[in-house]
Image (cartoon, rainbow, N blue to C red):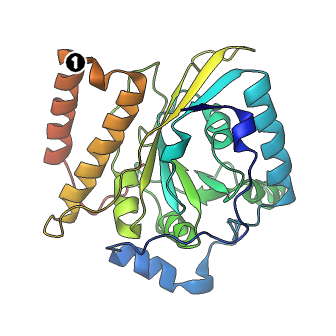
Amino acid sequence: MSSTESSLDSSPPEAPPAHPEPAYQGPEFHEAVAAGPGLDPLVHADPYQPHLFYRAVFAVVRWIVFHVFRTTVEGRENMPPPPFIIASNHQAWYDTAFIVSAFPKRPVIYTMARRDTVFNGRWKRWLVPKFGVFPIQPAQGELDARGVASVYQLLDRGAVVLMFPEGRYSKGRALRPLKKGVAHFALQAGVPICPVAVEGLEKLRPFMRVKVSIGPPIRPDPPAWWDLNRRVQRMLDGVRTSILRAFGLFTSGTRTAADRLRAEYARLIGASNPGTRRL
């Protein structure tokens, strides 16, 4: 299925849609949600009531994405009901605009940014949260406790959170090793991961072809007897496979791609730690 801007005009309901009760939610999630009004004041609190600035910028960005560029969206029928986590490859700083434009106007799609740089001025702390950006303060690749709590509290409110599990920019269809944070969050919160592959953004030029492919959701429903670390690895494998399949690499049957995947899985399993939340 392929769609453009016209197919995204229908606005979802103002209230969060009903979604199935998750089979499992972990202690980290319950602890963060139990904090109640402890949501970081720099986080936009209601994903179904976007700020006027968010709505205005969303409309302008979406017009640019579908009119200045030849952007197509495939797999829109694969979107699960919120809350969920979008896990995408990361080619450039501007690919967030194309990803957000491929999804409905509501709920807000939240992204994270460093507290010490993006939120380091009074006007930034006033303006940036209105666009669904919330602060984190990573140390050695691991999120701070307040940033982790924000992710869980937003998912509990029915939000969509965008993450880039590669951790830094990739080139073309080459996918860097995925960090485990995205799978850990999904398993703790009991929400699906929506894998997304963005293609064609290596060099930004007007009227260039861009494709956003949305894969089937990866749901956190592994056997109950698996330990958390194995669950994280299983979901991570599914995210990588979905993104590669969207690029046409996983189904190509090439030995090189398969060998790289097997080697990376072995490395991740050997170096895994169920307590990490690396992004």
Q: Quadrant of residue 7?
A: top right
Q: Secondary structure at mark 1?
A: loop
Q: Estimate the x, y position of residue 90 in percent, counting from the top left.
A: 51, 33
Q: Is residue 209 left or right of residue 50?
A: left
Query: Which residue is located at x 57 percent, y 85 percent?
Result: 36
Q: Is residue 54 left or right of residue 76?
A: right
Mark 1, residue position: 253
As drawn, 128 above or below 67: below
Viewer-proximal residue among 204 and 121: 204
Query: Which residue is located at x 40 percent, y 61 percent?
Result: 185
Tell me the kind of residue under disc 1.
Gly
Viewer-proximal residue among 217 and 160: 217
Is residue 31 in sight in this rendering?
yes
Q: How busy is the neighbourhood of tag 1: few (under 14 within 10 Å), some, or many (20 plus)?
A: few
Is residue 136 in sight in this rendering?
no
As drawn, 275 above or below 268: below
As drawn, 134 above or below 86: below
